[in-house]
Structure formats: structure tokens, C-alpha cells
Amino acid sequence: TMEEKMYRPNFHFTPKKGWMNDPNGMFFANGYYHLFYQYYPDKSVWGPMHWGHAISKDLVKWEEQPIAIYPDNDKYIFSGSAVVDVNNTSGLKKGENAPIIAIYTLHDMTKEKEGKIDVEQQDIAFSNDNGFTWQKFEEGNPVVKNPGIRDFRDPKVTWDETHKQWIMVLAAQDRAHFYKSSNLKKWEFLSEFGKNIGAHGGVWECPDFFQIEVEGTKETKWVLIQNLNPGGPNGGSGVQYFVGDFDGKTFTLDPDFAKRLENEKAVWADYGKDNYAGVTWNNVPASDGRRLFIGWMSNWEYAQQVPTTSWRSSTTIARELQLVKNGTYYNLVSQPVKELDNYVSKTIKTADLKGSGDLVLVKEGVADLSQTIISLDLKKLKQENYTLKLSNADGETLSFGLNNKENYLFVDRSKAGKNDFSDKFAATVSKAFLNGNQKEASFKFILDKTSIEIFYNNGEKVMTEIFFLEKPFSKLSISSKEKIEINNFKIQELNFSKSH
Ligand code: FRU
């Protein structure tokens, strides 16, 4: 169908049919990266939540699996996480494999309809076959009762190697709550974080919490990811984060990061409109050592109206997160996983492109499924505005780039195909403000049928946005009033038909 042909992404995961939102319960075990997700198989709008399931060997090509966890009537399975219980601390091991424990929110729709407060509690389920089939832990649920907070959900559990304990962080209305456990079944409340800190335009949802080495040093810091909806950087849903320290009980903001927050109010892992509920993988082997992230590539402002009918939503490309100390502050940078490079089928490289007006970088066909790097030396070029344009013969155009006078990156999808399904979709140009004038601007961007993911200056700032074209993009150009010189341009065609 036209929908399959034009809108089904090549390498971003989508369920074959039905509705998907948040990624859930990701872990690595036995050769596979597992991805679960908020799923309603019967309609392509939000409904009774299941955990859908997909697996991948390389974080790029995904294979859908049977549904992992089903709701019981009106008790929906909301977002959460999963851990590989290597030492069988839970005692739930049966047979040879380490048990895998999923910790999720059970959301009671009947209580919700009755206007009750204690609608959400944390339950667990376990798998004894490396994550393929699951059983609810009926005799022990809930493992965390509702303490009298209406929005109390999305537990993220990880092993805290420094303090030798399981740590759970969950979203409690507009705060993050921390718990600890030795066996994943009994949890003790530790502390809360977030009062009057960061963005609070909506409820906090889907937190993540991990220790990470600062790039190029042996220093470690703790990062709290705290998704928020609404109140994102360009409206609706967004992924904010905090950097600090953790003593086994309390998370304390790093003093320099606190200063950064005074200027920026909130710091985001992505400044585009379409990266939400993003969290990271557990149990990635130490020999790999990466902190791997994936988000839901949509936004609650219009996710249920986008023009696909048999399925709705996809994930972002999986990304590697790194914590980089940038002068005085810590910055969480993201890069697409390196495994994507295995799918490059053709490279077109150009140095020293010169011209003015609409300088065509590529035409004819390669632009629609590709990754591109383009670098501009702004010590030489003195323009105010650099606009990259993807377009097709119908005149559909996606524009993005740098305004180096007012110091921001932008993405404008107002002319990039269908947008009349929601007045929130293309009403404003998305912006990401930068720290002053740029000396060098490098854009790496990844295109699939319905998305662009822009990684600016090695992932220092990221913008992810979706669009719905009538025809694929065929041309990439850069526009400039004056003569422009491009030192480094490389476009790589991606091909997913060969096997890996
Ligand atoms: C975030 C969210 C979560 C919740 C889930 C329900 O998008 O609202 O807080 O667990 O979706 O599907």
C-alpha cells in the first residue's frame, strides 16, 4: 500500500500493526538486544497497554516477537524496565538461565474512572528463557504499593555496582523517587529529587538513572534522565536530564550543572519534537561498555493523529550516550550507534564545493535513505544563516541549519509534506539555542522515510523530527546569499536489503 511504501521506515522499529509508545525494559542477553514497548495491538491509537517485544543483534535491524506481557482486563501494563538477575538475588531462577525481572507499573483503569488516587503500583514479572516468555509474579505483587500519589510510575531499575544494591527510580508526579533493594522484591524508599529543579511544564515520566565515566577521564558521574510531558523544549514531550552525584541514597546536582540550569532552565538530550520516553539498555557487556539509548519518535501533541493507519509510531535510531566535560559543564552527547555504518552501500564525498544561491550537494535519489556529514568552517564563512534543504520534484522541502547571529539550530518541517492532521505538528520552527557564536558547524544527519535525526558537532546537540511526504526527497542543497565553501561533505547511501 501507499502507506507501507511511503511511511514504513526502513530501519527504525515499527510494530507490524497497532499502536506503540514508550520503549520499555531494554536489556542485552545471550546475543540479543531486547526492546519492549508500550503496545496496543488492536487499534492504532492508545488503549489497553501490553508490552510488545522486538529483538536485534545489532540495534539497527529489529525483529518483532510475540507480545511479552498482557494486561488483565482493566489493569494495564505501563512503562518500566528489566534487569538480568545474574546472581539470582530474586530467587526466581528456574533451570539454567539467569532470571530476567521486568519491573513495571500496573495501572488500574477502574480506579482511574472512579477518580481514585491509588491508581498506579509497581509489579514484577520474570522470564526464565532469556527474555522471550514472561510470568507475572502473582504471589508477590505489588512490590511497591501506591503511597498516595496519583502519578506514580515508570520504574527504572539498575544494579548500582558502587553501593552493591538494586536502585529503582520512578516518576512521582513532578519528582523522581529513589528506592533500593537487595532482591528486587522488597523495596525501601531512599529519597526524592526535583522540587523546583529543571522543567516542570507537565508530569515527570519515564526516568532513567545511571553512573557513567566522563569521557577521557576516570571520573564518574550520575545522570538522571527525566522525561516530561508537556513542557518539552519545542512543545509537548521531551527528554531532560540532570548530572550529579549519588551517595547510595541521595542524588545531588553537580554544582556546575546547577549553574548551567540557572542559565538554561532545563537541559535536554534532544531538542527536536520527536524523541520521548527515551531510556537506556541494562546489562550491556562490560567489554562493550556503551550506554545505549532509544526513544519513542513521536510526541503526545499529535502521536495519535499522524497519517498512518495500520500502525502508529516508530523508535529513534539507537544512540550511544557519552558524558563530555565541556569547559565548565557536563554535557550528555548522543551519536547514532556505530552499527549503522555496516549498512552503508555507497559513499559520495566532496571537498571544496564552492558556489552561491542554492548550492546543490546531491540530486537524484540518494538523499532519501542516507547518512550525511557536512562541516562548515565558520572562521572563514561569515554568513548569518546556513540552511540545508531536502526537497523533491513536488517542492516538498525540509529545512534545517544554523542561525549564527542569534545562535540557534533550527528545523522547519512546515513545507515537508502532510501536516494538516494536527495544528501542533508544524506550527512553529523548532530551535535549539547554542552557547554563543559558532566557529565550526558540523551536521551529521540520518534520514529514513519519515524522519531526520540531526547530530550537531559530534552529538553535542541533537534534533529529531518526523514528517510525511507525498514523494521521497531527491535533492540536498545548501543555500547561501554569498559564495560559500564546503570543506567536508560526505553522503552515504544506506541499504537494508542485504543480510548481516
Ligand atoms: C509516557 C507514558 C508513561 C506511561 C505510559 C502509558 O509516554 O505516559 O508515563 O507509563 O506512557 O502508556
Image (cartoon, grey):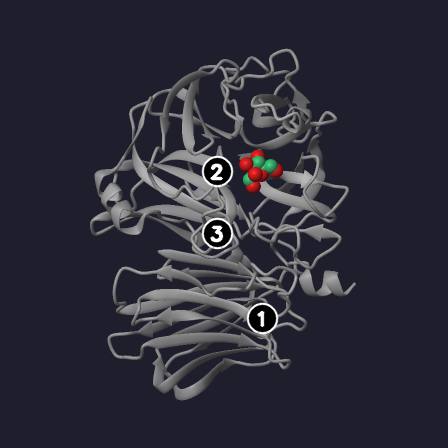
Query: What residue is pinned by disc 1?
Result: 416
Determine whether the beta carbon of the residue marked 2 sits less than 8 angstroms from the nearest atom of ligand 1: yes
Q: Which secondary structure, mark 2?
A: strand
**N-term mark: 3 or 1:** 3
Q: Residue at x 22, y 43 (%)?
A: 256
Q: Position of residue 273 (x, y in %)?
A: 50, 56
Q: Residues within 10 Å of mark 1 (few under 14, many from 20)?
A: many
Q: Residue at x 74, y 55 (%)?
A: 309
Which labelled disc corresponds to residue 336?
A: none
Residue 233 at x, y percent in the picture: 42, 53
Whether residues under marks 3 and 1 lie with C-beta atoms below 8 angstroms apart, the answer is no
Mark seen at residue 203? 2
Work out whether residue 262 or residue 56 is closer to the camera in this orientation and state it.
262
Of labels 3 and 2, earlier in sequence is 2
On-image quarter of the N terminus:
bottom right
| Residue 122, percent from left and from top | 56, 22
Residue with the mark numbered 3: 337
Foreground mark, 3 or 2?
2
Would you identify the image quadrant in which residue 480 lies? bottom left
On the question of residue 25 being in view, the answer is no
In the image, taking residue 448 as reference, residue 163 lies left or right, namely: left
- Position of residue 352 relative to residue 378, above or below, is below
Q: Quadrant of ligand 1?
A: top right
Three-letter code for the amino acid on which mark 1 is drawn: Ala
Horizontal side of 71 relative to 257 (left or right) equals: right
